[in-house]
Image (tube, rainbow, N blue to C red):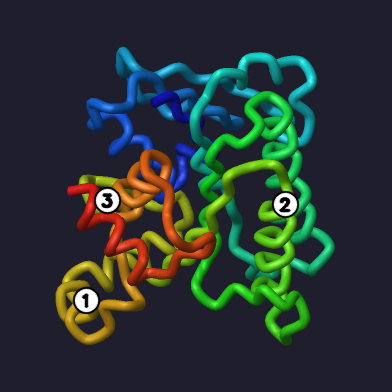
Amino acid sequence: MKIIIFGATGMVGQGALRECLLDGAIEHVLVVGRSATGVKHEKLQEIVHRDLFDFSSIEEKFSGYDACFFCLGVSSAGMNERDYTRITVDLTLAVAQVLATQNPGMTFIYISGMGTDSSERGRSMWARVKGRTENALLRLPLNAYMFRPGYIQPLDGITSKTKLYSALYAVMTPLYPLLRRLAPGSVTTTKELGRAMICVAQRGAAKRVLKNEDIHHCCGEAS
């Protein structure tokens, strides 16, 4: 398989990239982002592209891929709905529409979040906007899947670029085994998430929206 990853410098994207490079069934990985990952591997190609809203100069480079793992995202903290919508909805669709043109029917896996509001009418701004993004992706000529993880524990030396999140993970890491026992349906890891994305890209899934328990099920099949 040939995979495109957006957001490979983020925590989830780092996990997805690591699992793709380790998987013998994946022959080529294209990473697209505003900055380089610093990773070197024979299967890896990177495109540093500053304007993620406009791919007109490079869109032909996206042809011939089987799946896209879209791991880009920002926290809604301190953002108004207009600005959060531009990054969460508009940027995601800018990518997805180009990929749908270059690879009709390709698998597109969008990392959303637990609590996303598919009705687009709830009180939570971030959940409405995420729901709008999911619904728009599902209308495109793509084989699209929405992943809704809850708490994600970073593994394998992976870290978050957000200082607040890094501090949170430092506190939570010793507590993660307990959290996993008490609330297994609300937590996952970067490794499990990466393996589940590969599994769905290879085999598909019965659901278009996958929650933590579905992610764990995919991981079990893929391991």
Q: What residue type is labelled 2?
A: Ile
Query: What residue occupies the far front of the structure in this picture?
Result: 206
Q: How far apart are marks 3 and 1 (CA)?
A: 15 Å
**Rendered residue at 34%/51% (across/down):** 196
* 92 vs 143, nearest the viewer: 143
**Rendered residue at 50%/35% (across/down):** 67
Q: Where is residue 45 in the image (x, y as percent from the top left)?
A: 45, 17
Judged from the image, the secondary structure of the residue bearing numbered disc 1 is helix
Q: Earlier in the sequence, mark 2 or mark 3?
A: 2
Q: How far apart are marks 2 and 3 (CA)?
A: 26 Å
Q: What residue type is labelled 3?
A: Lys
Q: Position of residue 65 (x, y in %)?
A: 52, 24
Label 2 vs label 3, nearer the camera: 3
Q: How far apart are marks 1 and 2 (CA)?
A: 31 Å
**Rendered residue at 74%/37% (across/down):** 97
Residue 35, compared with residue 189, is above or below; it is: above
Q: Earlier in the sequence, mark 1 or mark 2?
A: 2
Residue 17, compared with residue 91, is above or below; it is: above
- Can you say which quadrant of the picture contains the N terminus? top left
Other-residue count near label 1 (Cα within 10 Å), few / some / many at <14 / 14–19 / ≥20: few
Q: Are marks 3 and 1 in contact (CB under 8 Å)?
A: no
Label annotation for residue 191: 3
Label annotation for residue 180: 1
Q: Which quarter of the figure has residue 112?
A: bottom right
Label annotation for residue 167: none
**Rendered residue at 74%/61% (across/down):** 84
